[in-house]
Image: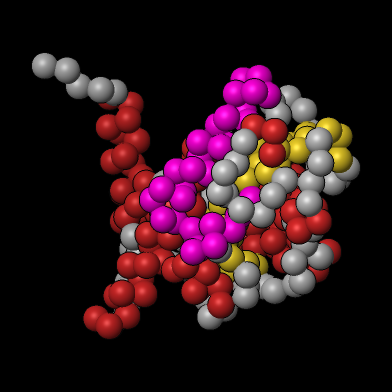
Amino acid sequence: MNQAALRQAVIDSANFLVRVGAISMSHHGNFSVRVPNTDTILLTATSSFDNLRPENLALLDLEGKLVEGEINPANAEIVHMHAIVYKERPETGAVVHTHSTYATSFALASKSLGCSYEALVRSDMTDGIPLAKYGPRGSAESITNIAKALNETTNTKAVLLENHGVLAFGADPAAAARANLIVEEAAQMAIFAEVLGGAKNIPSELLRATVGRRDEFARAGTQKA
């Protein structure tokens, strides 16, 4: 995929999150996509998903050096927050950060999100969503805490940032946006479940069974009469 297509994929995925409401009221967020076969990323250079255009993405390397374009101070702060995911999870193709309301509520309460919602299982988040301890936005401390959360949690596609928000990732921008949405859904339902006694995590043996059933039907492919 060329850079023009990558830029459009980011814009489409950011617009998707705004459209479905998996984002805070301010529409604050930032999105990045890795340029294939390079150590560079395209990162949204503004702090809002409103009115994004292809030229609003800057090209940077994974050490934070600006290669092409421009980036505002607020987003320059968070470059390493994205870069650490690509470094720790080399298979990652895109990263999105939002302050989506329900997921961020868990982050503000300093709570990780357990795997009680089947959609998390089917999206390869059987370990739930870990909590990265707080550090000032984009600081070395915050990046170390994100890396620690990723290293301690194998099967996940997101990290909750204590007192801050959520960081989700996937193979491409659409997958990263989908991960953000599913985490937001799971957090919303877990909060609602509190009035009924609290969400119950799916037992480990049933997690394996659910993944196995998903994979079995995926291998069979689309059925046609």
Answer above or below: position of 139 versus 47. below
**Front residue of 123 and 168:** 168
Residue found farthest to the front: 51
Answer above or below: position of 81 versus 33. below
Q: Magenta stretch: dominant SS?
A: helix
Q: Can residue 86 be seen at all in this image of the molecule?
A: no
Membership of 22 in magenta stretch: yes
Answer above or below: position of 77 versus 87. below
Quarter of the image holding residue 38? top right
Q: Can residue 196 be seen at all in this image of the molecule?
A: yes
Span colored in magenta: 1-30
Residue 208: image location, x then y, percent: 36, 50
Q: Quadrant of the C terminus?
A: top left
**Front residue of 93 and 33:** 33
Residue 67: image location, x then y, percent: 86, 34
Residue name at image x 53 percent, y 44 percent: 14
**Front residue of 1 and 68:** 68
Q: Quadrant of the N terminus?
A: top right
Residue name at image x 64 percent, y 23 percent: 4
Membership of 170 in magenta stretch: no
The reply, left or right, for residue 164 in relation to residue 60 is left
Residue found farthest to the top: 225
